[in-house]
Amino acid sequence: NFLLNSPVSDAIISMKNIRSRDYFAAKVRKNKMDCLFCEIIAGNIPSNKLYEDDRVLAFYDINPQAPVHFLVIPKAHIASADAITADNAETVAYIFSLIPALAAKAGLTGGYRVITNCRPDACQSVPHLHFHVLGGAQLADRMA
Ligand code: 5GP
Ligand code: ZN
């Protein structure tokens, strides 16, 4: 239906932070041309970029959960942490090799937390692998 087939509505749904299992299930059935983060990589949806190269994009989260909150994503479409394999693990390692410099660039002198939410139990709302980097204040002791 219309709601599940429009990039604009995807963005609105995502911005409202609706995280229903039905929405996620619909999203994972779709191909990468319908993926919100692939659209951001393509430049079809604007983002506040922190860093970009040929393999990786880092951009600030539209709904920050800490004073500094950015996302680091591979440009290749990987659905979630569950889809990391020996074939794409090098990209994941490359992302982690960049995170210290990205955290420094974002001013995270006191430390930071790196999180990836995988599938519905973890409330993954965008089915394109992304690492949240959060900091800029003392974060909660509990993670969930
Ligand atoms: P997840 O819930 O899948 O772990 O994380 C998805 C993140 O993407 C959320 O923190 C959400 O705020 C962020 N997000 C959703 N849509 C957009 C968008 O259009 N632009 C940006 N910059 N962040 C987004
Ligand atoms: Zn994607």
Image (cartoon, rainbow, N blue to C red):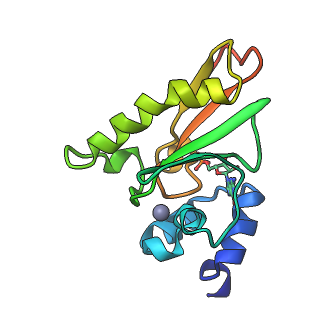
Q: Position of residue 126 (x, y in %)?
A: 56, 57
Residue furthest toward the left? 86
Q: Nearer the viewer, residue 136 or 82?
A: 136
Q: Is residue 138 left or right of residue 51?
A: right
Q: Is residue 37 left or right of residue 10?
A: left
* Res 70 visible: yes
- Residue at x-position 78% and y-position 59%: 16
Say which quarter of the image contains residue 134.
Answer: top right
- Residue at x-position 28% and y-position 41%: 89
Location of residue 36 with respect to 85 vertically, above or below: below
- Residue at x-position 61% and y-position 27%: 103
Q: Nearer the viewer, residue 49 or 96?
A: 49
Q: Position of residue 8 (x, y in %)?
A: 71, 76
Location of residue 68 with respect to 1 vertically, above or below: above
Q: Nearer the viewer, residue 130 or 9?
A: 130
Location of residue 96 with respect to 72 vertically, above or below: above
* Res 144 visible: no
Location of residue 4 with respect to 143 vertically, above or below: below
Say which quarter of the image contains residue 51.
Answer: top right
The quadrant in which the N terminus is found is bottom right
Q: Position of residue 4 (x, y in %)?
A: 61, 78
Mark count: 0
- Residue at x-position 60% and y-position 43%: 71
Q: Position of residue 3 (x, y in %)?
A: 67, 80
The quadrant in which the C terminus is found is top right
